[in-house]
Amino acid sequence: MYRVVFRKVLDFVFPPQCGGCERIGSGLCDTCLPPGVPLERRLPTLTVRALGLYDGALRRAILALKTGRRDVAEAFAVRMSSHIPTGAIVVPVPTTAARRRQRGFDGCELIALIARLACEARVSAGLVQVRGETQRGRSREARLTHRQRFRWRAPHLDGTRVILLDDVVTTGATLESCAATVRAAGGIVELAMTLASVG
Ligand SMILES: [Zn+2]
């Protein structure tokens, strides 16, 4: 009850604003909200579903999310949660300390957290990056050859279905590397969900 009242006061003082076009009302307005049917991309061992192409209003909303906009994160979490199969665990792709310093904020973790609160999705932050290197600034070729390495630090997954969650998919190398790590820890991964896809 108090949470609801607090929330209403908060919405009154800081009304939600669309991350794509700044319109007041919600974190993503009806115009900027990506269509209900996600894009699908095939990677060697995974299907990636993205809400849309990394462009225009969606790109602006993702950049707003990365500045820590909770209203935008909530709007994304609601849209993503309708694509989460029941019984699966959502595992966010970890952000390195270096990447966090550059971007200031991990929108993906926030979306996963809100999805857990709002939709009772199961979330595990079990993936951690082994090396502190980042893909940012590397050429496409370098990204493909220099795969990031991850470690699973949570209990063995024992046949549990895992959905990987990341903000933007580019080559897909990071998602494939995460999937391999989760499979080695006993999880089944066939699907990754991202907010947007580059190409
Ligand atoms: Zn908008």
Image: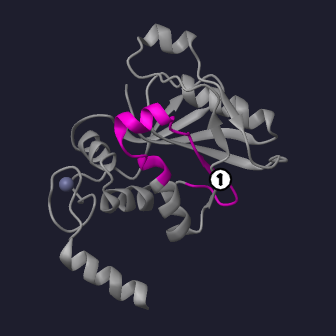
The kind of secondary structure element at disc 1 is loop
| Front-lying residue, 127 or 196 | 127
Residue 180 image point, x, y percent: 71, 29
Residue 123 image point, x, y percent: 62, 56
Image quarter in which the N terminus is found: bottom left
| Front-lying residue, 15 or 47 | 15
Residue 11 image point, x, y percent: 25, 76
Please give the name of the residue rendered at 32% of the width and 49% of the height, measured from the top-left corner.
Answer: 65
Does residue 4 appear to the left or right of 134 in the view shown?
left
Residue 103 belongs to magenta span: yes
Image quarter for ligand 1: bottom left
Q: How many marks?
A: 1
Residue 55 image point, x, y percent: 26, 34
Q: Please give the residue where the numbered disc 1 appears in the rendered image.
A: 124
- Amino acid residing under circle 1: Ser
Does residue 136 appear to the left or right of 11 in the view shown?
right
Please give the name of the residue rendered at 55% of the width and 22% of the height, measured from the top-left corner.
Answer: 173
Is residue 83 visible in the rendered structure shown here? yes
Q: Which residues are magenta?
A: 84-109
Image quarter in which the C terminus is found: top left
Residue 186 belongs to magenta span: no
Does residue 33 appear to the left or right of 128 in the view shown?
left
